[in-house]
Amino acid sequence: MDEDVKVCLTEREIPRKWYNIQADLPHPLPPPLGKDGKPIGPEALAPVFPMNLIEQEVSTKRWHAIPEPILEVYRLWRPSPLRRARRLEKALKTPAKIYYKDESVSPPGSHKANTAVAQAYYNREFGIKRLATETGAGQWGCALSLGCKLMGLECKVYMVRISFDQKPFRKMMMRMWGGQCVASPSMETQAGRTILQQQPNTPGSLAIAISEAIEDAVTSKDTRYALGSVLNHVLMHQTVIGLETQKQMKKIGLYPDVVIGCAGGGSNFAGMAFPFVADRIHGKSVRILAVEPAACPTLTRGPFAYDSGDVAMMTPLLAMHTLGHAFVPAPIHAGGLRYHGMAPLVSHVLREGLIEAAALPQTECYEAAMLFANTEGFIPAPETSHAIAAAIREAKRATEEGKERIILFNYSGHGLMDLNGYEAYLNGKLTDYELPDQELQTSLKCLEGLPKPPPLQG
């Protein structure tokens, strides 16, 4: 069966529970802090999130049952196929076997729908009528627009301006599913107006868009905020990816030597990786690699520090690898990876030595995406191309060492709405940008005076 190109599960084999890695961490996650530097309780999050999601956020219970209404929607695209990249292997002349979990088969075309549907459901059950959110590349905005439509909620999306301009069809997808999308920073919030007054030509950032969405949520009736990455409950919802993949690998009698995912805020990476991190915690030999852009090197160059998730510092302080909440990333085409901070749980498992991280230049990633498209046929999202580039590096290393290796990566989304980036690449207009150290140090000044995370004990 390991010769099959597609490894499929039946709908009856969709996981019935999400996995919460907090139950198995060697050391507990540092708690979120308020502006006074003291740990906050669940009640502090109540103006922003419904209590049923807050309970998931702070939970250390290992398994959380997936409600039937969510499973009913999941069945539209889940279980997703695990594919063998046989033609890519042949082109690379590698002894490695390369597998990828295809999360592009959801209606919005990415993994984001796994949590969008869940968050819309839990908000509806709590009596919420409307959700406000941000989006970078637009995949999350599309996914939440769909989730809200299927669960009967209204949706407002603040889209990072550079992506708003680069990706007009994402806006149309949101509109088709009833989502209202505006460019961020906008004139619709105080946070947006302040930024525009200071930087009228800003390309925007996820940190700015988050500030706008949170302000909208806390000042509007029957509204809460929804986040597409970073938070614990979001990452937990995504573990349906890795749990399915484990069943599929078992079906063909294989286990990966290395598991790879692109990483911006951390959701698709955690969704694939955390079930395998649990295996590693319990003694299994597996390498796990998070891949980010060299232009936004949060895991590889950002300190592990307490920081806010948004530029206006409306969120609690979270212990995470960060480039500073004031950081405005370069307008690279992988818009979903342009975030200053990494999910606290992803940051924590890196700190624990359970995963590795690498930062890659965008031209290498586009080159990898082109090779993938010309062998496997599918056009990847620019974000996903980072995972593909890392998988190709691993395959070439297997060739050099003359070793067979099982490489697994998460194909987090397709690039059919991202063709402007490919056009720029094909026309020779894309260049690499590595964050200068001076710019990084300037950005990190916004962390001065904030609390420091406690050191790992033992």
Image: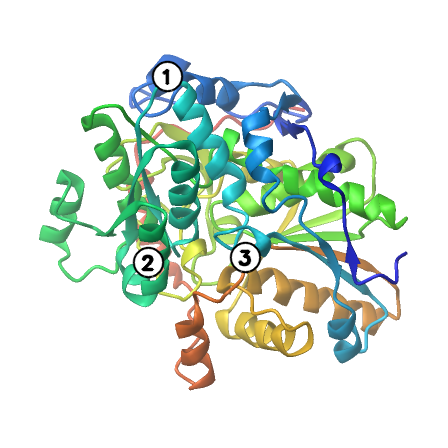
Say if residue 41 shows up in the picture: no
Instruction: Identify the coloring.
Output: rainbow
The numbered mark, 2 or 1, whose residue comes first in the sequence reads: 1
Q: Which mark is residue 413?
A: 3
**Residue count near mark 2 (Cα–Cα under 10 Å), binned few <14, some 14–19, many ≥20:** some
Q: List the residue tagged with mark 1.
A: 38
Rendered view: 339 above or below 49: below
Q: Position of residue 409 (x, y in %)?
A: 68, 55
Rendered view: 347 above or below 93: above
Q: List the residue tagged with mark 2.
A: 172
| Label 1: element kind | loop
Please indicate whether residue 429 sits to the left or right of residue 201 in the image: right
Q: For the residue marked with disc 3, what is the amino acid?
A: Gly
User: For the point 15% across and 40% down, which residue is it?
Assistant: 189
Disc 3 and disc 1: Cα gap in Å?
Answer: 39 Å
Q: For the residue marked with disc 2, what is the amino acid?
A: Met
The numbered mark, 3 or 2, whose residue comes first in the sequence reads: 2
Q: Which of the two residues, 34 or 375, is positioned nearer the viewer here?
A: 375
Q: Position of residue 30 (x, y in %)?
A: 51, 25
Q: For the residue marked with disc 1, what is the amino acid?
A: Lys
Looking at the image, which residue sits at the far left?
A: 197
Q: Which of the two residues, 31 or 164, is positioned nearer the viewer here?
A: 164
* Quadrant placement of the N terminus: bottom right
Q: Which of the two residues, 189 or 80, is positioned nearer the viewer here?
A: 80
Q: Which mark is residue 270?
A: none
User: For the point 74% across and 66% down, which residue is it?
Assistant: 85
* Quadrant placement of the C terminus: top right
Rendered view: 211 above or below 96: above
